Amino acid sequence: MASLKRKGRSPFWFCAFRLPDSRRVCRSTKQRGRTQAREVCQAWQHAADLAREHLLTQARSRALIEEIESLTGMARRKLWTVREFFADWLAVRKKDLSEGTHTRYVTAVEHFTNFLGARVEVSLEAITSDEIARLRDRLALEKSTGSANLTLKVLKAAFAEAHRRGLVSQSPAVPIKPLRASRDAVARRPFTPVELARLLDQTKGMEWHGIILLGIYTGQRLGDLATLTWANVDLLRQEIAFTAGKTKRRMVLPIARPLLAHLETLTSSDNPKAPLFPELAELARKRVGTLSNQFHKILSDVGYVDERKHVACGKGRDAKRKSSAISFHSLRHTATTLLKAAGVSDAIAREIIGHESSAVSRVYTHLSTEDLRRAVDKLPDVTTPAKE
Protein backbone atom coordinates (compact mmCIF):
# COMPACT_ATOMS: atom_id res chain seq x y z
CA MET A 1 0.00 0.00 0.00
CA ALA A 2 1.48 3.32 -1.06
CA SER A 3 1.53 6.22 1.41
CA LEU A 4 2.60 9.88 1.57
CA LYS A 5 4.98 11.43 4.06
CA ARG A 6 7.02 14.53 4.67
CA LYS A 7 10.79 14.39 4.76
CA GLY A 8 13.04 16.91 6.46
CA ARG A 9 12.63 20.46 5.20
CA SER A 10 11.69 19.45 1.68
CA PRO A 11 8.60 21.31 0.37
CA PHE A 12 7.59 18.20 -1.60
CA TRP A 13 5.56 15.17 -0.57
CA PHE A 14 7.34 11.81 -0.63
CA CYS A 15 5.77 8.54 -1.76
CA ALA A 16 6.53 5.26 0.02
CA PHE A 17 5.71 2.28 -2.19
CA ARG A 18 6.89 -1.23 -3.05
CA LEU A 19 8.95 -1.98 -6.15
CA PRO A 20 8.34 -5.10 -8.29
CA ASP A 21 10.98 -6.97 -6.26
CA SER A 22 9.04 -6.14 -3.03
CA ARG A 23 11.59 -3.61 -1.77
CA ARG A 24 9.94 -0.60 -0.12
CA VAL A 25 11.33 2.74 -1.26
CA CYS A 26 10.59 6.40 -0.68
CA ARG A 27 10.72 8.82 -3.60
CA SER A 28 9.96 12.51 -3.92
CA THR A 29 6.85 13.22 -6.00
CA LYS A 30 8.10 16.76 -6.73
CA GLN A 31 4.59 17.90 -5.82
CA ARG A 32 3.74 20.46 -3.13
CA GLY A 33 0.03 19.73 -3.07
CA ARG A 34 -1.16 16.62 -1.25
CA THR A 35 -3.87 15.75 -3.79
CA GLN A 36 -1.52 15.78 -6.77
CA ALA A 37 1.17 13.97 -4.78
CA ARG A 38 -1.33 11.20 -3.91
CA GLU A 39 -2.24 10.74 -7.59
CA VAL A 40 1.45 10.44 -8.54
CA CYS A 41 2.11 8.02 -5.69
CA GLN A 42 -0.81 5.77 -6.63
CA ALA A 43 0.30 5.75 -10.28
CA TRP A 44 3.79 4.65 -9.23
CA GLN A 45 2.42 1.83 -7.10
CA HIS A 46 0.10 0.77 -9.92
CA ALA A 47 3.05 0.61 -12.35
CA ALA A 48 5.09 -1.42 -9.85
CA ASP A 49 2.20 -3.85 -9.34
CA LEU A 50 1.82 -4.35 -13.10
CA ALA A 51 5.57 -4.91 -13.46
CA ARG A 52 5.48 -7.52 -10.66
CA GLU A 53 2.83 -9.43 -12.63
CA HIS A 54 4.78 -8.95 -15.89
CA LEU A 55 1.92 -6.89 -17.31
CA LEU A 56 3.68 -3.53 -17.69
CA THR A 57 3.77 -3.16 -21.46
CA GLN A 58 5.28 -0.27 -23.39
CA ALA A 59 1.81 1.07 -24.14
CA ARG A 60 0.75 0.92 -20.48
CA SER A 61 3.95 2.66 -19.42
CA ARG A 62 3.28 5.52 -21.79
CA ALA A 63 -0.34 5.76 -20.66
CA LEU A 64 0.72 5.99 -16.99
CA ILE A 65 3.27 8.70 -17.72
CA GLU A 66 0.73 10.69 -19.70
CA GLU A 67 -1.74 10.29 -16.83
CA ILE A 68 0.78 11.63 -14.31
CA GLU A 69 1.62 14.56 -16.60
CA SER A 70 -2.08 15.36 -16.94
CA LEU A 71 -2.73 15.14 -13.18
CA THR A 72 0.22 17.32 -12.24
CA GLY A 73 -0.17 19.84 -15.04
CA MET A 74 3.27 19.05 -16.43
CA ALA A 75 4.03 19.82 -20.07
CA ARG A 76 3.60 16.63 -22.05
CA ARG A 77 6.99 15.18 -22.96
CA LYS A 78 7.50 13.22 -26.16
CA LEU A 79 8.56 9.66 -25.46
CA TRP A 80 11.02 8.69 -28.15
CA THR A 81 11.34 5.15 -29.37
CA VAL A 82 14.79 3.89 -30.36
CA ARG A 83 13.80 3.98 -34.03
CA GLU A 84 12.44 7.55 -33.83
CA PHE A 85 15.41 8.96 -31.94
CA PHE A 86 18.14 7.47 -34.12
CA ALA A 87 16.38 8.50 -37.33
CA ASP A 88 16.15 12.07 -36.00
CA TRP A 89 19.73 12.05 -34.68
CA LEU A 90 21.21 10.85 -37.98
CA ALA A 91 19.27 13.49 -39.90
CA VAL A 92 20.62 16.25 -37.64
CA ARG A 93 24.20 14.94 -37.67
CA LYS A 94 24.22 14.69 -41.47
CA LYS A 95 24.60 18.47 -41.64
CA ASP A 96 27.89 18.38 -39.71
CA LEU A 97 29.49 15.19 -41.04
CA SER A 98 31.29 14.39 -44.26
CA GLU A 99 29.48 12.00 -46.56
CA GLY A 100 31.86 9.16 -45.71
CA THR A 101 31.58 9.69 -41.95
CA HIS A 102 27.80 9.94 -42.14
CA THR A 103 27.72 6.66 -44.05
CA ARG A 104 29.74 5.01 -41.28
CA TYR A 105 27.33 6.43 -38.68
CA VAL A 106 24.37 5.04 -40.62
CA THR A 107 26.05 1.62 -40.78
CA ALA A 108 26.73 1.67 -37.04
CA VAL A 109 23.10 2.55 -36.27
CA GLU A 110 21.94 -0.23 -38.62
CA HIS A 111 24.11 -2.69 -36.67
CA PHE A 112 22.37 -1.53 -33.48
CA THR A 113 18.79 -1.57 -34.77
CA ASN A 114 19.24 -4.93 -36.50
CA PHE A 115 20.58 -6.32 -33.24
CA LEU A 116 17.59 -4.99 -31.29
CA GLY A 117 15.01 -6.34 -33.72
CA ALA A 118 11.49 -5.61 -32.45
CA ARG A 119 12.94 -3.64 -29.52
CA VAL A 120 13.58 -0.67 -31.83
CA GLU A 121 10.01 0.31 -30.94
CA VAL A 122 10.65 0.45 -27.18
CA SER A 123 11.39 3.64 -25.32
CA LEU A 124 14.95 4.92 -25.61
CA GLU A 125 15.10 4.79 -21.81
CA ALA A 126 14.55 1.00 -21.92
CA ILE A 127 17.89 0.24 -23.60
CA THR A 128 20.38 -1.36 -21.22
CA SER A 129 24.14 -1.37 -20.98
CA ASP A 130 24.06 -5.15 -21.31
CA GLU A 131 22.49 -4.88 -24.76
CA ILE A 132 25.18 -2.50 -25.96
CA ALA A 133 27.93 -4.72 -24.55
CA ARG A 134 26.48 -7.78 -26.27
CA LEU A 135 26.29 -5.91 -29.58
CA ARG A 136 29.93 -4.83 -29.22
CA ASP A 137 31.04 -8.40 -28.57
CA ARG A 138 29.01 -9.81 -31.46
CA LEU A 139 30.45 -7.29 -33.92
CA ALA A 140 33.98 -8.06 -32.74
CA LEU A 141 33.33 -11.73 -33.40
CA GLU A 142 31.49 -11.40 -36.72
CA LYS A 143 33.19 -8.30 -38.18
CA SER A 144 36.26 -6.87 -36.47
CA THR A 145 37.36 -5.12 -33.30
CA GLY A 146 37.51 -1.89 -35.30
CA SER A 147 33.87 -2.22 -36.41
CA ALA A 148 32.81 -3.02 -32.86
CA ASN A 149 34.62 -0.02 -31.40
CA LEU A 150 33.37 2.33 -34.11
CA THR A 151 29.77 1.27 -33.49
CA LEU A 152 30.28 1.74 -29.76
CA LYS A 153 31.72 5.22 -30.37
CA VAL A 154 28.68 6.19 -32.44
CA LEU A 155 26.26 4.86 -29.81
CA LYS A 156 28.10 6.75 -27.08
CA ALA A 157 27.73 9.98 -29.07
CA ALA A 158 24.04 9.33 -29.75
CA PHE A 159 23.11 8.49 -26.17
CA ALA A 160 25.16 11.42 -24.86
CA GLU A 161 23.02 13.69 -27.04
CA ALA A 162 19.86 11.95 -25.77
CA HIS A 163 21.02 12.60 -22.21
CA ARG A 164 21.73 16.28 -22.95
CA ARG A 165 18.21 16.61 -24.35
CA GLY A 166 16.73 14.98 -21.26
CA LEU A 167 15.42 11.96 -23.16
CA VAL A 168 17.26 9.46 -20.94
CA SER A 169 18.26 9.78 -17.29
CA GLN A 170 21.69 8.35 -18.07
CA SER A 171 23.48 6.92 -21.08
CA PRO A 172 23.59 3.11 -21.14
CA ALA A 173 26.72 3.32 -23.33
CA VAL A 174 28.87 5.10 -20.74
CA PRO A 175 29.96 1.99 -18.77
CA ILE A 176 30.90 0.06 -21.92
CA LYS A 177 34.57 0.27 -22.83
CA PRO A 178 36.07 -0.24 -26.30
CA LEU A 179 37.85 -3.50 -26.97
CA ARG A 180 41.58 -3.80 -27.33
CA ALA A 181 42.87 -4.89 -30.71
CA SER A 182 43.63 -8.59 -30.71
CA ARG A 183 47.26 -9.64 -30.76
CA ASP A 184 46.81 -11.37 -34.08
CA ALA A 185 45.31 -8.27 -35.73
CA VAL A 186 47.00 -7.31 -39.00
CA ALA A 187 49.09 -4.15 -38.57
CA ARG A 188 49.20 -1.67 -41.43
CA ARG A 189 52.63 -1.10 -42.96
CA PRO A 190 54.11 1.19 -45.59
CA PHE A 191 54.90 0.05 -49.10
CA THR A 192 58.52 -0.75 -49.90
CA PRO A 193 60.28 1.14 -52.75
CA VAL A 194 60.18 -2.01 -54.91
CA GLU A 195 56.46 -2.46 -54.25
CA LEU A 196 55.79 1.18 -55.14
CA ALA A 197 57.71 0.91 -58.41
CA ARG A 198 55.84 -2.22 -59.42
CA LEU A 199 52.50 -0.69 -58.43
CA LEU A 200 53.16 2.43 -60.49
CA ASP A 201 54.25 0.34 -63.44
CA GLN A 202 51.06 -1.73 -63.19
CA THR A 203 48.87 1.40 -63.30
CA LYS A 204 50.56 3.33 -66.13
CA GLY A 205 47.96 4.95 -68.35
CA MET A 206 45.28 4.60 -65.65
CA GLU A 207 43.81 7.31 -63.42
CA TRP A 208 44.99 5.17 -60.53
CA HIS A 209 48.60 6.06 -61.43
CA GLY A 210 47.98 9.69 -60.50
CA ILE A 211 45.98 8.84 -57.40
CA ILE A 212 48.79 6.62 -56.13
CA LEU A 213 51.39 9.34 -56.72
CA LEU A 214 49.20 11.78 -54.81
CA GLY A 215 48.92 9.28 -51.97
CA ILE A 216 52.69 8.85 -51.85
CA TYR A 217 53.55 12.54 -51.92
CA THR A 218 50.70 13.99 -49.84
CA GLY A 219 49.64 11.11 -47.57
CA GLN A 220 45.99 12.10 -47.92
CA ARG A 221 42.93 9.88 -47.82
CA LEU A 222 41.54 8.15 -50.88
CA GLY A 223 38.17 9.92 -50.82
CA ASP A 224 39.81 13.37 -50.70
CA LEU A 225 42.25 12.62 -53.52
CA ALA A 226 39.68 11.04 -55.82
CA THR A 227 37.45 14.12 -55.64
CA LEU A 228 40.12 16.76 -56.29
CA THR A 229 39.21 19.24 -59.01
CA TRP A 230 41.37 21.58 -61.07
CA ALA A 231 40.28 24.37 -58.73
CA ASN A 232 42.26 22.57 -56.00
CA VAL A 233 45.47 22.51 -58.02
CA ASP A 234 47.71 25.52 -58.71
CA LEU A 235 50.48 24.34 -61.03
CA LEU A 236 52.10 27.80 -61.17
CA ARG A 237 52.45 28.03 -57.41
CA GLN A 238 52.93 24.26 -57.23
CA GLU A 239 50.32 23.81 -54.50
CA ILE A 240 47.28 21.67 -53.80
CA ALA A 241 44.61 23.22 -51.55
CA PHE A 242 41.50 21.45 -50.26
CA THR A 243 39.48 20.76 -47.14
CA ALA A 244 39.88 17.26 -45.70
CA GLY A 245 36.53 15.48 -45.65
CA LYS A 246 37.06 13.69 -42.35
CA THR A 247 38.64 16.42 -40.23
CA LYS A 248 37.30 19.51 -42.07
CA ARG A 249 40.85 20.80 -41.86
CA ARG A 250 42.06 23.17 -44.58
CA MET A 251 45.15 21.74 -46.25
CA VAL A 252 47.58 23.66 -48.46
CA LEU A 253 50.35 21.32 -49.61
CA PRO A 254 53.32 21.94 -51.88
CA ILE A 255 53.56 19.59 -54.88
CA ALA A 256 56.64 17.36 -54.95
CA ARG A 257 58.57 17.45 -58.24
CA PRO A 258 57.73 13.87 -59.37
CA LEU A 259 54.05 14.51 -58.66
CA LEU A 260 54.18 17.86 -60.48
CA ALA A 261 55.69 16.18 -63.53
CA HIS A 262 52.74 13.79 -63.67
CA LEU A 263 50.07 16.43 -63.08
CA GLU A 264 51.46 18.47 -65.96
CA THR A 265 50.77 15.55 -68.31
CA LEU A 266 47.06 15.47 -67.45
CA THR A 267 44.56 17.12 -69.76
CA SER A 268 43.24 20.12 -67.87
CA SER A 269 39.72 21.51 -68.23
CA ASP A 270 38.37 25.01 -68.78
CA ASN A 271 35.91 24.19 -66.01
CA PRO A 272 37.72 24.59 -62.65
CA LYS A 273 35.16 22.28 -61.04
CA ALA A 274 36.12 19.42 -63.36
CA PRO A 275 37.77 16.53 -61.46
CA LEU A 276 41.40 15.57 -62.07
CA PHE A 277 40.31 11.96 -62.34
CA PRO A 278 36.74 11.91 -63.80
CA GLU A 279 36.14 8.15 -63.65
CA LEU A 280 37.38 7.72 -60.09
CA ALA A 281 35.62 10.90 -58.95
CA GLU A 282 32.31 9.49 -60.17
CA LEU A 283 32.90 6.27 -58.23
CA ALA A 284 33.88 8.24 -55.12
CA ARG A 285 30.72 10.30 -55.39
CA LYS A 286 28.66 7.12 -55.21
CA ARG A 287 30.71 5.17 -52.67
CA VAL A 288 34.36 5.40 -51.62
CA GLY A 289 34.26 1.71 -50.72
CA THR A 290 34.06 0.89 -54.42
CA LEU A 291 37.39 2.66 -54.93
CA SER A 292 38.94 0.68 -52.08
CA ASN A 293 37.79 -2.54 -53.72
CA GLN A 294 39.29 -1.45 -57.06
CA PHE A 295 42.60 -0.68 -55.39
CA HIS A 296 42.53 -4.07 -53.68
CA LYS A 297 42.08 -5.65 -57.11
CA ILE A 298 45.19 -3.80 -58.35
CA LEU A 299 47.13 -5.04 -55.33
CA SER A 300 45.98 -8.61 -55.97
CA ASP A 301 46.95 -8.33 -59.66
CA VAL A 302 50.56 -7.63 -58.66
CA GLY A 303 50.47 -10.36 -56.01
CA TYR A 304 50.61 -8.19 -52.90
CA VAL A 305 47.30 -9.38 -51.39
CA ASP A 306 44.96 -12.32 -51.82
CA GLU A 307 42.21 -11.93 -54.37
CA ARG A 308 38.72 -11.50 -52.98
CA LYS A 309 36.56 -14.30 -54.29
CA HIS A 310 33.05 -13.13 -55.18
CA VAL A 311 31.57 -16.56 -54.77
CA ALA A 312 29.32 -18.07 -52.13
CA CYS A 313 31.21 -19.42 -49.15
CA GLY A 314 28.30 -20.06 -46.82
CA LYS A 315 29.18 -17.13 -44.54
CA GLY A 316 26.93 -14.45 -46.03
CA ARG A 317 27.77 -10.91 -47.16
CA ASP A 318 28.20 -9.70 -43.58
CA ALA A 319 30.88 -12.26 -42.76
CA LYS A 320 34.08 -11.08 -41.14
CA ARG A 321 36.52 -9.98 -43.84
CA LYS A 322 40.17 -10.93 -43.70
CA SER A 323 42.34 -7.84 -43.25
CA SER A 324 45.43 -7.07 -45.31
CA ALA A 325 48.65 -5.46 -44.15
CA ILE A 326 48.56 -3.06 -47.09
CA SER A 327 45.77 -0.98 -48.59
CA PHE A 328 45.45 2.54 -49.96
CA HIS A 329 45.67 3.80 -46.38
CA SER A 330 49.17 2.32 -46.31
CA LEU A 331 50.23 5.20 -48.54
CA ARG A 332 49.72 7.48 -45.53
CA HIS A 333 52.20 5.29 -43.68
CA THR A 334 54.46 5.38 -46.74
CA ALA A 335 54.38 9.18 -46.94
CA THR A 336 55.16 9.49 -43.24
CA THR A 337 57.99 6.96 -43.51
CA LEU A 338 59.54 8.74 -46.52
CA LEU A 339 59.38 12.11 -44.77
CA LYS A 340 61.00 10.75 -41.62
CA ALA A 341 63.66 8.93 -43.67
CA ALA A 342 64.44 12.22 -45.42
CA GLY A 343 65.13 13.84 -42.06
CA VAL A 344 61.94 15.90 -41.91
CA SER A 345 60.92 16.90 -38.39
CA ASP A 346 57.95 15.32 -36.68
CA ALA A 347 56.05 18.63 -36.60
CA ILE A 348 56.40 19.21 -40.35
CA ALA A 349 55.57 15.59 -41.18
CA ARG A 350 52.38 15.85 -39.15
CA GLU A 351 51.47 19.11 -40.85
CA ILE A 352 51.84 17.57 -44.29
CA ILE A 353 50.03 14.31 -43.56
CA GLY A 354 47.36 15.99 -41.45
CA HIS A 355 47.83 13.93 -38.29
CA GLU A 356 46.64 15.58 -35.10
CA SER A 357 48.63 15.08 -31.92
CA SER A 358 48.46 16.44 -28.40
CA ALA A 359 52.26 16.24 -28.38
CA VAL A 360 52.57 18.64 -31.31
CA SER A 361 49.99 21.35 -30.83
CA ARG A 362 49.20 23.39 -33.90
CA VAL A 363 48.59 26.34 -31.59
CA TYR A 364 52.31 26.55 -30.87
CA THR A 365 53.67 25.22 -34.19
CA HIS A 366 53.50 27.74 -37.04
CA LEU A 367 54.84 26.41 -40.33
CA SER A 368 55.02 28.32 -43.59
CA THR A 369 54.37 26.86 -47.02
CA GLU A 370 58.08 27.21 -47.71
CA ASP A 371 58.86 25.04 -44.68
CA LEU A 372 56.64 22.35 -46.14
CA ARG A 373 58.09 22.80 -49.64
CA ARG A 374 61.64 22.25 -48.40
CA ALA A 375 60.39 19.09 -46.72
CA VAL A 376 58.71 17.58 -49.80
CA ASP A 377 61.73 18.50 -51.94
CA LYS A 378 63.69 16.00 -49.85
CA LEU A 379 61.44 13.12 -50.87
CA PRO A 380 62.83 10.51 -53.28
CA ASP A 381 61.57 10.11 -56.83
CA VAL A 382 59.60 6.86 -56.68
CA THR A 383 58.89 7.01 -60.40
CA THR A 384 62.44 5.95 -61.21
CA PRO A 385 63.17 2.19 -61.36
CA ALA A 386 63.83 0.65 -57.98
CA LYS A 387 66.39 -2.06 -57.44
CA GLU A 388 65.13 -5.48 -56.41
Image (cartoon, rainbow, N blue to C red):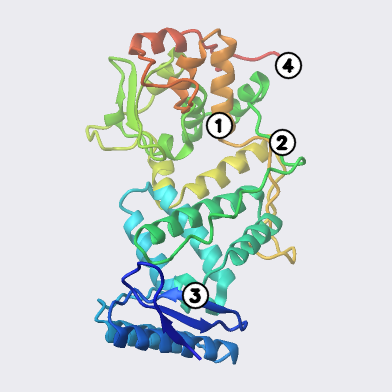
Q: Residue sitting at 36 percent across and 87 percent down?
A: 38
313 relative to 222 in the view: left or right: right
Q: Is residue 220 above or below residue 307?
A: above
Mark 4: which amino acid? Glu
Q: Nearer the viewer, mark 4 or mark 3?
A: 3
State the image quarter where residue 228 is shown: top left
Q: Is there CB contact under 8 Å for labels 2 and 4?
A: no
Q: Are marks 3 and 2 in contact (CB under 8 Å)?
A: no
In the picture of the structure, the residue carrying the numbered disc 1 is 203
The answer to whether marks 2 and 1 mark residues whose Cβ atoms lie closer than 8 Å is: no
Provide residue 346's location: percent of width, then percent of height. 51, 15
Please name whichever residue, 11 or 199, is drawn nearer the observer in this view of the structure.
11
Secondary structure under badge 1?
loop
Q: Which residue is mark 4?
A: 388
**Between 190 and 306, which is closer to the camera in this rendering?**
190
Write the residue at 56% across / 76% down.
117
Q: Amino acid at mark 3?
A: Val
How many numbered dots are placed on residues in this image? 4
User: Label 2 amino acid?
Assistant: Gly
Residue extending farthest front: 8
| Mark-to-mark CA distance, 4 and 3 | 57 Å
Mark found first going from the N terminus, 2 or 1:
1
Mark 3 vs mark 2: give the one in front: 3
From the image, tell me which residue sits under label 2: 303
Q: Position of residue 197 (x, y in %)?
A: 62, 22
Residue where numbered disc 3 is placed: 120
Residue 155 x/y as whole percent: 50, 57
Can residue 59 be spotted in the picture?
A: no
First along the sequence among labels 4 and 3? 3
How far apart in space, not on screen, are marks 1 and 3 (Cα)? 47 Å
**Above or below: residue 189 compared with residue 107:** above
